[in-house]
Image (cartoon, rainbow, N blue to C red):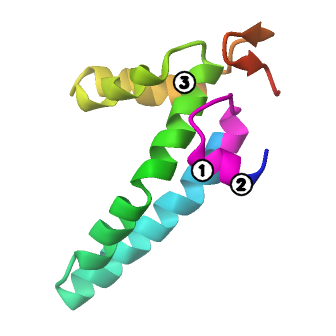
Amino acid sequence: MAISTLLFSFEGRITRAQWWGYFAPYFVIYVCLLIVGARLQSFFLPMAYALVMLYPTLAVNVKRCHDRGRSGWFVLICLVPILGFWYLVEICFLPGAEGTNECGAHQG
């Protein structure tokens, strides 16, 4: 999958490995910016980074929801305090639906 498709399209499916390949560097960069922001007593950098990465993060998470056989709207579950934990478990650790679903063929 092309990087532009991965980051800017809400269509298709991605595997857990592809999701982790996006999320791990995103998280490391964000934590580094938080540390720098704390040392500078300014959290502009981590907030700006999170804002810039909002659209690509949503696109990647929607594709991961598609891989699990869920609608992209399932991403909103993470906003509900208790249900947000289930969202993380499902997106981070559970395998995608086998075969083809309405969002395309399984890649793994």
User: Residue 103: horizontal and vertical position, in percent?
Assistant: 67, 18
Residues 43 and 52: in front is 52
Tell me the tag on residue 65: 3
Mark 2 Cα-neighbour bin, 10 Å: few <14, some 14–19, many ≥20: few
Q: Are marks 2 and 3 in contact (CB under 8 Å)?
A: no
Q: Residue at x 65, y 22 (%)?
A: 67
User: Residue 70: horizontal and vertical position, in percent?
Assistant: 53, 14
- 82 sits left or right of 108 in the view: left
Q: Residue at x 32, y 70 (%)?
A: 48
Label 2: which residue? 3
- Image quadrant in which you'd find residue 93: top right
Tell me the tag on residue 90: none
Q: Amino acid at mark 1?
A: Leu
User: Residue 4: horizontal and vertical position, in percent?
Assistant: 68, 54
Check the image and report above or below for 65 versus 28: above
Tell me the tag on residue 7: 1
Q: Which secondary structure lies at badge 1?
A: helix
**Distance in Å between CA atoms under marks 3 and 1:** 15 Å
- 21 sits left or right of 36 in the view: right
Check the image and report above or below for 80 versus 34: above
Visible in this render: residue 41? Answer: yes
**Distance in Å between CA atoms under marks 2 and 3:** 18 Å
Q: Amino acid at mark 2?
A: Ile
Residues 105 and 17: in front is 105
Check the image and report above or below for 50 versus 90: below
Q: Which secondary structure lies at badge 3?
A: helix
